[in-house]
Image (cartoon, grey):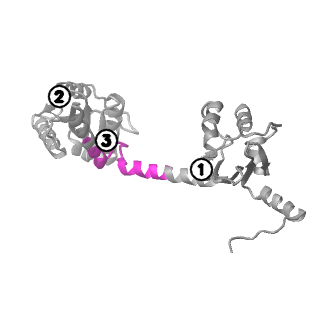
Amino acid sequence: MPGFVADLDGETLRCLVEALSESGQAISIYDSNDRLRYANKTYQDLFLGDFEGPFTFSEILRYGARNGTGVRIDDDVEALIARTLPRRRSVPRKSFVTDFVDGRWFWMDHTILPNGWVLTVGADITALKHDERTLRQAHDAALLASRTDVLTGLPNRRYILEILDERLRVSKHEDAGLCIALIDIDWFKSINDRYGHEVGDAVLQHFSSVCRERLRPDVSVGRTGGEEFLVLLPSVSLEAAVRTVDHFRADFPPVRIDGSAIDLAYTFSAGLTEALPQDTRNGILQRADRALYAAKADGRNRTRAR
């Protein structure tokens, strides 16, 4: 049985209109000339307010644009009307999400009836959109946490290596220069042994903070483990990269130890290398590691390049 239709007496029609008004859905019917023929209470609250007509689709949109009601319009209302009118009857049925100036979101079902009239039924999905936003924020926070070193707030080993892979790809395909530096804080074990691990942690946090403050915004710094850091310097020659790291190292400030008046000075060693066309991640890291070993072997607190 495809459906059931009965003669609508006055009481049945009154109950139907009341049900549509109280449903919470936004229901409207426009005739073939786009004049509003029926709007339940929810639709009136969303679109009409104190509007006194004329009740055509275009004029209702213009009223909303003038009074800050109805759907959110990010551009000129006339441009929106010009885009929308040709599409209102382009397909028999369509659904879309729209947001309103008051912050609500509705899922709109738009149906063309056989006589050319338009039936629109909108369901309030504001709560779902808020849940979606919360889930997206939770996902973004989890992704950030998975990429971040907890102690320093810098990219962790996995993420800084992913950034290195991408920088190598760009360097090969766009002929853009790339240098990397492996940095190791000097005598870090002695700092831990003498002052304790809390001070050691403070040194790592201080080093990370100074990197963020003093290196260029396009320079990426990540903690690869322990007291070792990887620095990616794009669009520079090896000579320029060495000058940058040497200047950074020579003017490096001490860290104030909490709860005391002690400013603890510390140094670091750096090994630099420049990306070659055939370089893989392992290849460039091995060269930088050999350069870092040379800096340590030469007495620490210095920069070496390969």
- Looking at the picture, which amino acid does disc 3 mark? Leu
Residue under pointer 2: 238
- Looking at the picture, which amino acid does disc 2 mark? Leu
Q: Earlier in the sequence, mark 2 or mark 1?
A: 1
Q: In the displayed orientation, state which residue is furthest to the right.
A: 10
Q: Nearer the viewer, residue 21 or 105?
A: 21
Residue under pointer 1: 91
Residue 138: assigned label: none
Query: Quadrant of the rendered structure where residue 245 is?
Result: top left
At which x and y percent is residue 225? Answer: 26, 48
| Drawn side of residue 20 relative to residue 176, left or right | right
Residue 120, visible in the rendered structure? yes
For mark 2, give the secondary structure. helix
Residue at (23%, 39%) from the top-left corner? 168
Give the alpha-carbon distance from disc 3 to disc 2, as whole Å: 26 Å
Give the alpha-carbon distance from disc 2 to disc 1, as whole Å: 61 Å
| Drawn side of residue 240 relative to residue 60, left or right | left
Residue at (61%, 31%) from the top-left corner? 79
| Drawn side of residue 290 relative to residue 34, left or right | left
Q: Earlier in the sequence, mark 3 or mark 2?
A: 3
For mark 3, give the secondary structure. helix
Residue 204: assigned label: 3
Magenta segment: 137-164
Q: Nearer the viewer, mark 3 or mark 2?
A: 2
